[in-house]
Amino acid sequence: MAIKYTVTPKNLHAHLFQVELSIQNPNPLGQVFSLPSWIPGSYLIRDFAKNIVSIQAQSCGELIEINKLDKNHWIAQPCGDELTLTYEVYAFDLSVRSAYLTSERAFFNGTSLFLLPLGLESESCELSIVAADTMQTMGNWSCATGLEQVDDLAFKAQNYQDLIDHPVEMSDFTLFEFDANNVKHKMAITGLHNADVSRLKQDLKTICNHHIAFFNHDVPFKDYTFLTLVKANGYGGLEHKNSTSLICSRKELPVVDMNGINKDYTRFLSLCSHEYFHSWWIKTIKPASFHQLDLNRENYTEQLWIFEGFTSYYDELSLLRTKLLTPEKYLDLFAKTITRVQKSKGRLTQSLAQSSYETWTKFYQQDENAPNAIVSYYTKGALLAFTLDIEIRKRTKGVKCLDDVMRHAWENCQESGLEDNSIQMIVDELVGDDMSSFFNDYLYGVKELPLQQSFDYVGVDCEFVAYAEDLTDFGLNITTQSEFSQITHVFANTSAQAAGLYVGDKIVSINYQQLKEKPLIAEINKYAMGEVIKVGVLRDELLLEIPVLIIDITPSYCRLSLATKLDKETVNRQEKWFYQE
C-alpha cells in the first residue's frame, strides 16, 4: 500500500502549492497526520505547519471533518476505506530549507509540503507533480530531483523519510551531467548566470572523485544531484541523501577565460565540496541518536563539531589536495577561518561540545550577545579537526592521521552510528595512547587550541596581528543604515564594553566632533592606546557623552605562510598533510 501525493503549483503569484494526499485503510478510530517542525541539517524549530492555509478531507466523495490537534497535527474523523486530504501551502521562503513558488521557479523540501499519516511511516510513497501553467511561468520549466523517477513528473520513495530527503526544483534551469567513479552526477543551475559550464563540470568532477576515493570508493548513492540557485547575492547549502540544495552569488560561478581560481569561485567550490562530503559524513555515518529522528521536537547531540567541523576542515583541504588550490591560497583561506574564531569572544565561554548541544537555542537563534557567549562548531570544529589531525601525526610519527579516523568510522559505524565518545575511542585505538587530556582541554573545555605548535610541525608560520581598520578590536559592530552609526554588538573585555557603550546606541561624535559624514574607525584610530576619548551617543533620543579609555588589544588576525629553510623531515610532513590520500 503506497501513500500517494500530488503536488500542483496552484497559484504562482499567491505562492500557493496544492497538495493532495491519498491513503487506503485509514485508522478506524480517526487518522492523525503531522508535518515536520524542522528539517534535518538545519537545527532550529521552524514550524512549517504555519504555512498550511487551508485543509479539507474527503472519503468516498464525501467531505469529512478534520480538526487540528496542536500546531502540527490534525485528525480526520473515522471514515471508509480510503481518505484524501487536499490542502494549500504558502511557499515564499527563498532559502534551501523550505518551499518557494513564483513565476520564476518552484522549489520545495518535503518537510514543508508532505503531511505524514501516522502509523504509515514505513509505507512506500508515490509523488506526482502537475506541470505549472506555462502561461504564467518564466521560460520552459523542467524538473530536477534526486527522487527515483518512474514516469514524466512521477516519482517514488521507499518510505516517508526517504520522500522528505529529496528536494525538488522546477524552473528553466541549465542542466549538465558528468560521471565520477562511474556514478552519474548532474547539476541544475537556476537563475541568470554566465557560468563556464565546462570549467565547472570539470572542477566538480575532480572534487567528487576525490571524496569518493577518500572513502575507499564506497559510494552511498546511485546518482547525485546538485540543485543550485543563483542570485545577485546569496549563500547557503543543505545536504540530502543523494543531492544538495545550494544558493550562490552570480560572481561565485566561473566565467569563460577566467585565469586560475579566484576567491569567489573558491567559495562556491568549497560549498559544493562541503555538502557533497556530507553524503558520507552525516547522511550515512551519523550520531547514533539521529538514526530515529523525531521531527516534532529538538534532537540533541554533542557531535555537530564532528560532523560539521570535520566537514568544514576537509571541504577546503580537499581543494588543496586536488590541486585546485595552491598551498598559498589554501593557507589564506585557513587563516580567515582562524581569524573568525579568534575574534569570537564566545570561544572562551562555550565549549565545542556545548556549542553542538545548544545549537537549537543559541547558534541558530543568535542575539546581540552571541559573539560573547557562543562559538561556531563549524569554524572552531574545523580548527579542532586540524589540531587533532596534527596530534595524531605527531604521536604516531606520521603513520596515522585524521583520514584514518574518518575511514575507520566509515567502515565500522554505518549501522550503529557514533556515540558521543566514539571518535575519542577510535583515536585512542589508532594512536595507541590515551588522548583524554586533549579532548578534555579542547572539546569539553575552552582552552586555546595549540595552533602555532601544530603549524610548526608542518612547516607553516602562524602569526597574529592587530588590524587597525576593524571596529571589533575597539569592541563594536555597527550598522550604518541610519543617519549615524548604530551599535549592533558590544564585545566582552574591550574598550567599548568597559566604558558602558550599549547595543542600540547611535554614535554621533568623537571628542565633540560630529561623525555624520566621517568613518567611525578612522576617527578612533586618531587616538593612541591609553588615551581617553569622549564618545557622544544618542540613547533613547537623549545625548550622552561617555568617556572611553583606549585599551590594548590582543592581536587576533591570523596570517599563515609557508616557512622557509625547512629540514627534510618537516618538508615531508608538510607534503603529507597537504596531499596525503
Image (spheres, rainbow, N blue to C red):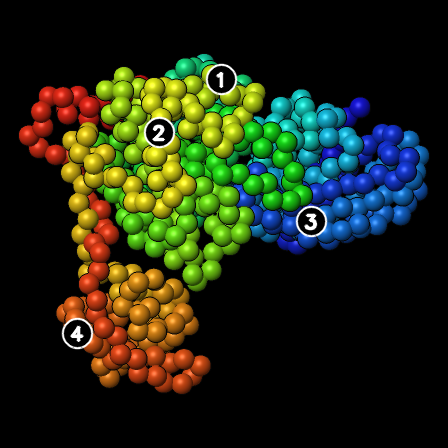
Q: Residue at x 56, y 29 (%)?
A: 288
Residue at 30% from the left image edge and 80% from the top image edge = 546
Residue at the image position 53 percent from the left and 21 percent from the top = 414
Q: Is residue 495 left or right of residue 51?
A: left
Q: Type of residue at label 2?
A: Met
Amino acid type, label 3: Ala
Front tag of 3 and 2: 2
For disc 4, the marked residue is: 531
The dot on residue 534 is: none
Residue 425, how many percent across, how many down? 43, 25
Please give the residue where the numbered disc 1 appears in the rendered image: 412
Camera-side mark, 4 or 2: 2
Q: Measured along the vertical axis of the image, is residue 79 above or below residue 513?
A: above
Q: Which one is in front in this view, the residue at disc 4 or the one at disc 3? A: 4
- The residue carrying mark 3 is 49
Residue 46 image offset from top left, x and y in percent? 60, 50
Q: Could you tell me which secondary element the residue under label 2 belongs to?
A: loop
Asked whether the residues under the numbered discs 4 and 3 touch, taking CB atoms below 8 Å apart as contact, a structural biologist would say: no
What is the distance, in whole Å, between disc 3 and disc 2 at their CAs?
A: 46 Å
Q: Is residue 378 left or right of residue 463?
A: right
Q: How far is mark 4 from mark 3, CA to CA?
A: 56 Å
Q: 16 or 215: which is nearer to us?
A: 215
Identify the residue at the far left of this view. Answer: 565
- The CA distance from mark 3 to mark 1 is 38 Å
Q: Rounded to the nearest whole Å, what is the CA distance between mark 2 and mark 1?
A: 20 Å
Where in the figure is residue 500, as x and y percent of width and height?
34, 74
Q: Which of the labelled discs sits on residue 435, or is there none?
A: 2
How packed mark 4 is, by other alpha carbons closer than 10 Å (few <14, some 14-19, many 20 or more), is few
SS under mark 4: loop
Kind of residue sitting beneath label 1: Asn
